[in-house]
Image: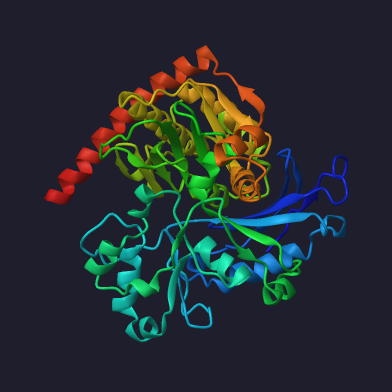
Amino acid sequence: MSGEASIDNGNYRPSEPYVLSVDVGTSSIKLGCVSLEGRLIWWDRERILAHQHDRDRWYPQTWLRVLQIMLDRLPRVLSGGIAAVAVSGHGPTVVPVDEAGEPLSHALMWLDTHEAIPTGGESYFLPKVAWFRDAHPHLFERTRLFLSCPEYIMYFLTGEAVTIAQSEEFARYVWTPDQIEAAGLARELFAPFVSIGRRVGVVSARAGRFLGLPENVPVVAAGHDFLISLLGTKTVVPGRTCDRAGTSEGINHCSATPVTDPQIRCLPHVVPGLYNVAGILSSTGRLFEWFRGISGQEGLPYDQMLNEIRRVAHRTEKPWFFPSIHQGAAWEFSRGMFIELGAQHGTAEMGRAVVDSIGFAVREAVEILGEHGCRIESLMACGGQAKNAVWNQMKSDIVGVPIEVPEVEDAELVGDACAAFTGLGEFGDVVEAAEALVRVKQRYEPSHEEYERYTSSYHTYRELYARFRDALVGCDSD
C-alpha cells in the first residue's frame, strides 16, 4: 500500500466546516475534505489491490483497515472541522454480515461472475445473494443482512443498516419485495431504503476509536459511485454528459426521458424524474495499466508515455488491439488481443493500438447515444484518466467534442459532499449543491485536422474488427 496525501495549506481556515468524503474504488480508496465552497482541502489515496486474486476474494475488513491507516494521516489542523461523513463505493457489490455486523465471507464484488439468476426482476444485487445462498448454505443461515459496499461502511460507522436508493423507480434495480419473494429470500435480510442526502446516524464510539474520528459526527447517505459521480460533474441537467473513467469507464448522459435499446444502459438518474443513459466500457483503466506492466513502463510518467504513443503517425503500419467483447455501446476490455503485430513494432506502436482502441470505444458510445436522441456536445471528464492532459486532448481529438475537466477530478468526493451538505441543510437539494460546488478548470478543444485523421483510422478499425469478429463466430460454429 502507498499513500498519496496532499493538503491545500494556502486556503484552509482552521475549523472551516467540511465534509469528509470517502470513496471506495475497486483498486484504491480516496479520501477528501471538501469545503462548502467545493474546494478540496485535503486529499489522500491508498492503493488496496495489487493482484488479481485479491479482487476475486476481497475481504470487507480490509476497507476498514485501509481507512484507519489513511485517517491516521489526516492533519491535526483539520481534526475539528468535520461537519459530516459521506461514503460512496462500487456496486453492485454485496457484503453478507452476521448478527454482530461482522462480514461472513469475502465481498461478492461487482465484477464477480458468480450469480444465480432468480425470477422476477431487474435487480443487480439479488443474483449475487441467491448464488451465495446456494453456494454457502451454512454461512447463509448465519447471515443477518446483505449490504452494499458503502452501506457496509456506514453500518460500521453508525450501527444503522440502510439500503440507498434515490427513488422508488431505482429500487427495482436494487430489490423490491416482489423480487425478494420470487427469489425465495426473506425480506428481513434487506435493510430499509433511504434516499441520497438522508442523515443515517452518527459516528459511534466504537467506530470513532477504531478510525480516529470524533464521535457523534453525522453520517449522510451517498451511495454507489457511478451515481455520485453525476453530482460531482454537474451532470444533473438534461443534455449534460460525463465520461467517468477509472478502472472501468462509462459515458453517462442525463436525459429527461428513458431510452430503451439493448445497445445502451438506461437507469433512473440520481435526480428523481431524470435518466442516466450510458455506454459502458468495462476495464479500460485496467487495460492501460496492464499494458504499462507488460511493456515495463510502470515507472514512466503517464504524460511521457502518451506523448511517445501520440508521435506514432496515423498512417504508420501498426498493430490493432481488439476487445474481447463488443456489443453496441458495451465494450469489454478485460481480455483482448493484438492483430497484425510484427517484429518491427515496439512499445509505442503497441501502446498506440491500445489507446486507439479505448478512444474508438468512447467515440462509438457517443455516436450510439446520439442516434437515440442523446446529443453530446461536450464531455465532463472525471476519474483517474481525467488527470492526464495528453489523454484528455487525444480523447477530444478522437471523439470530436470538447473535453472539460472539473477542479476536483475525483468527482465522487465532491458528489459525496453534495449529498452531505444537502443532508445538513446547506442546500435545498443535490442539484443545487452540484451547481454550487462543481467548477470547470480546463477545457480541451478538438483539433479539426487530428479529428479527420482519427476518423479515417476509426472507420478502418471498425471494419477490421467486424471481419475479425465474424471470422471468430464462424470458427465457433464449425
144 or 289: nearer the eye? 144
436 or 152: nearer the eye? 436
Q: Residue 457 appears in which quarter of the rendering? A: top left
Residue 418 vertical position relative to residue 355 in the rendered view, above or below: below
Q: Residue 369 appears in which quarter of the rendering? A: top left
Which residue lies at the image location 33% right of the left edge and 29% below the top edge? 368
- Provide residue 138's location: percent of width, then percent of height: 36, 87
207 or 342: nearer the eye? 207
How is this picture coloured? rainbow
- Provide residue 169's location: percent of width, then percent of height: 35, 48
Q: How many marks?
A: 0
Locate residue 320 relative to residue 222 in the image: left or right. Answer: left
Is residue 311 something one can see in this rendering? no
Placement of the N terminus among the 4 image quadrants: bottom right
Residue 226 vertical position relative to residue 308 in the rendered view, above or below: below
- Provide residue 69's location: percent of width, then percent of height: 72, 67
Outermost residue on the top side: it is 448
Is residue 96 something one can see in this rendering? yes
65 or 84: nearer the eye? 84
Outermost residue on the left side: it is 478
- Provide residue 91's location: percent of width, then percent of height: 45, 57
Which residue lies at the image location 71% right of the left edge and 60% below the top edge? 2
Which residue lies at the image location 31% right of the left edge and 27% below the top edge? 372
Which residue lies at the image location 50% right of the left edge and 77% below the top edge? 103
